[in-house]
């Protein structure tokens, strides 16, 4: 459990240290939706003009989509926040990859008609859930600890549906659809590994500092705030579009 939870409110120094995280979260979530899931006009136009098997373009698009998807990255950041051993990181990331790979393929091939706004709101909820989990909130509030592996897999499924709702915006030609989807999925995994590597490097340096445990509380509060903002943003979009 984070020490700040045992000692009450975080100190002013901790709050100041986490202020940049909060500011970044605000800027990210109030910026263009393309940073999270949106399909740029150039990418969409290119995909609509080509047909047949085009593995490298879809590989690139999958990697780009994950690296620029701040909601996915926030969740991954929360998942690895207190994972210190690489084998543990591998287990959780594999469960997340299994979840989003399954629903990405299913969502596109079976043309599931799911609101992108609602799916992205659930993705925001996953960020809030993980932040609260890192804060030890469930033990304090309910006296139980949810199975973190199951939660990672389940939220991975929703993240995959989020990917599926956006890749459908590409309006991919049916010719070569399955190979292109597989290439996109491989690209997503490559992007995830690149982003995860960067996160782990930063976390590794941060964990060596004396202030890591002091600042962990406020970092997770900032992450939870970002998730709540994402939920509100997506639900507002859903209400306006309805």
Image (spheres, rainbow, N blue to C red):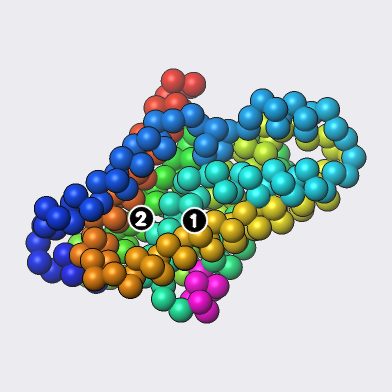
Q: Residue at x 51, y 77 (%)?
A: 86
Rounded to the nearest angstrom, the CA distance separating label 2 from label 1 is 10 Å
Q: Which residue is mark 2?
A: 129
**Labels 2 and 1 touching (C-beta < 8 A):** yes
Give the extent of the magenta segment: 86-92
Quadrant in which the N terminus appears: bottom left
Q: Could you say which is closer to the camera, residue 216 or residue 162?
A: 216
* Residue 126 vs residue 141, the one in the foreground: 126
Image coordinates for residue 107, horizontal then vertical, percent: 66, 45
Mark 2 surroundings: few (<14), some (14-19) or many (≥20) residues within 10 A: many
Asked whether the viewer can see residue 46, the reply is yes
**Image disc number at residue 126:** none
In the image, is residue 125 above or below residue 97?
above
Provide residue 6's location: percent of width, then percent of height.
Answer: 13, 69
Residue 65: percent from the left, percent from the top?
A: 61, 44
Q: Report the residue at 36% width, 42% height from top.
A: 24
- SS for dot 2: helix
Report if residue 79 is visible in the image.
no
Q: Is residue 72 above or below residue 80?
A: above
In the image, residue 228 above or below residue 72:
above
Residue visible at 18% across and 70% down in the picture: 3
Does the magenta stretch mainly form a helix, a strand or a loop?
helix
Q: Is residue 91 magenta?
A: yes
> Callout 1: helix, strand or loop?
helix
Q: Nearer the viewer, residue 124 or 206?
A: 206
User: Is residue 99 located in the magenta-colored stretch of the structure?
Assistant: no
Q: Which mark is residue 155?
A: 1
């Amino acid at each position: 459990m984070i020490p700040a939870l045992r000692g009450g409110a975080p100190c002013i120094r901790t709050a100041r240290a986490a202020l940049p995280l909060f500011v970044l979260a605000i800027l990210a979530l109030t910026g263009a939706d393309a940073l999270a899931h949106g399909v740029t006009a150039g990418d969409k136009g290119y995909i609509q003009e080509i047909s047949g098997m085009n593995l490298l373009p879809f590989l690139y698009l999958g990697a780009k989509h994950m690296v620029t998807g701040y909601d996915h990255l926030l969740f991954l950041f929360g998942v690895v926040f207190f994972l210190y051993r690489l084998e543990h990181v591998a287990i959780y990331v594999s469960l997340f990859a299994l979840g989003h790979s399954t629903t990405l393929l299913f969502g596109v091939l079976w043309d599931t008609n799911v609101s992108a706004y609602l799916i992205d709101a659930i993705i925001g909820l996953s960020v809030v859930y993980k932040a609260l989990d890192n804060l030890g909130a469930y033990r304090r509030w309910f006296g139980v600890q949810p199975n973190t592996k199951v939660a990672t897999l389940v939220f991975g499924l929703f993240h995959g549906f989020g990917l599926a709702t956006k890749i459908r915006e590409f309006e991919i030609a049916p010719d070569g659809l399955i190979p292109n989807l597989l290439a996109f999925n491989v690209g997503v995994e490559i992007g995830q590994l690149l982003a995860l590597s960067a996160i782990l490097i930063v976390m590794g340096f941060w964990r060596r500092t004396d202030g890591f445990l002091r600042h962990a509380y406020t970092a997770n509060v900032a992450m939870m705030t970002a998730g709540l903002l994402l939920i509100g943003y997506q639900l507002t979009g859903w209400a306006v579009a309805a």
